[in-house]
Image (cartoon, rainbow, N blue to C red):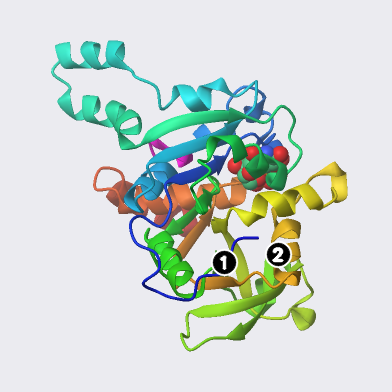
Amino acid sequence: MSEPVNDPTARSGPPFRSAVVPAAGLGTRFLPTTKTVPKELLPVLDTPGIELVAAEAAEAGAEQLLIVTSPGKDAVAAHFADSSELEKELQSRGKDDLVAKVRRAHELIDVRTVTQDEAKGLGHAVGCAREAIGPDEEAFAVLLPDDLVLPTGVLATMAEVRRRHGGSVLCAFDVPRGEIAAYGVFEVTDTDDEDVKRVHGMVEKPAPDEAPSTLAAAGRYLLDRAIFDALDRITPGAGGELQLTDAVALLIEEGHPVHVVVHRGGRHDLGNPGGYVRAFVDFALEDPNYGPDLREWLASRLNG
Ligand code: UTP
């Protein structure tokens, strides 16, 4: 385990260089679409969720995006590849605005892929990125592409918390107690910052009266590289999957500092059709082209 760093001046430069985006899951909740279309490419209005998350990673200062992908999901990496043929075609038609849209994913950030041969869980997926993360990188970010955390910027706060407290930093939302049974929930104690808590454990989907807090886990992690060693030492849980939260729990047990940043903003879960449709509608309502008509249609649909 690397030493916790408590001296805020001890770290300078970017807090992390690599952002891992696990995208090798089966996406069963979106079947039959995910037979051929990766869940991570489903559009939120017109842009795939994974591009939104790549933009967030780039904005936070990441230099490389490590997409964990599986043999049948080449389209995910293809979305970030050079598209000069299409760009030329659009240019010849005078569609400069579309050229910019098409180019964005390719220009955002350097993308590399690593392969997870079988969907053996989120922990296993993160472990697949190990060799692609430089030996000098003490920490790296993980962003789940089916989780939109809005407005963006929480990774910068998480990096600040790592500078202060060392160790690993996760992200949480404060949810109403009545809804807590749908989430992984943190067991925490306060720090001197209201929005930063020390984590002592995690409970998956607790009954509301048994939940240790109302802080639910979101898909953003800033992990010390000690996580790789922890992933080697945990055993697979339900369905033979290696859970990232089990590796985090092991680190906590061994005294590794883990904190959460409580994000006071919005969140969309793109991982299931119900959450996805909310995100789509939310983005569409904000859009100057589609928003006004949609608002009117929704109002009449709801009153009709
Ligand atoms: P999810 O559990 O939301 O995705 O994992 P899933 O397993 O693809 O979806 P369902 O449950 O079958 O509907 C969160 C993220 O982790 C990735 C997924 O691609 C998703 O982006 N993941 C999950 C992997 O990369 N590998 C895995 O083995 C599991």
**Mark 1: which amino acid?**
Gly
The quadrant where residue 33 appears:
top right
The residue lying at 24 percent from left, 48 percent from top is: 288
Q: Position of residue 51 (x, y in %)?
A: 41, 38
Q: Earlier in the sequence, mark 1 or mark 2?
A: 1
Considering only vertical position in the picture, is 149 above or below 193? above
The residue lying at 64 percent from left, 75 percent from top is: 199
- Quarter holding ligand 1: top right
Q: Which mark is residue 251?
A: 2
For the residue labelled by badge 2, is the local secondary structure a helix, a strand or a loop? helix
Circle 1/circle 2 CB separation < 8 Å? yes
Task: Please report the bounds of the magenta region as a residue range.
Answer: 45-50
Q: Nearer the viewer, residue 288 or 167?
A: 167
The quadrant where residue 29 appears:
top right
For the residue labelled by badge 1, is the local secondary structure a helix, a strand or a loop? loop
Q: Nearer the viewer, residue 8 or 299?
A: 8
Q: Which mark is residue 167?
A: 1
Q: Position of residue 301 (x, y in %)?
A: 46, 52
| Left or right placement of residue 257 versus residue 157 in this view | right
Q: Nearer the viewer, residue 181 or 302?
A: 181
The residue lying at 57 percent from left, 72 percent from top is: 259
The residue lying at 37 percent from left, 58 percent from top is: 152
* Residue 272 appears in the picture as rendered: no
**Mark 2: which amino acid?**
Leu
Asked whether 48 falls inside the magenta stretch, the response is yes
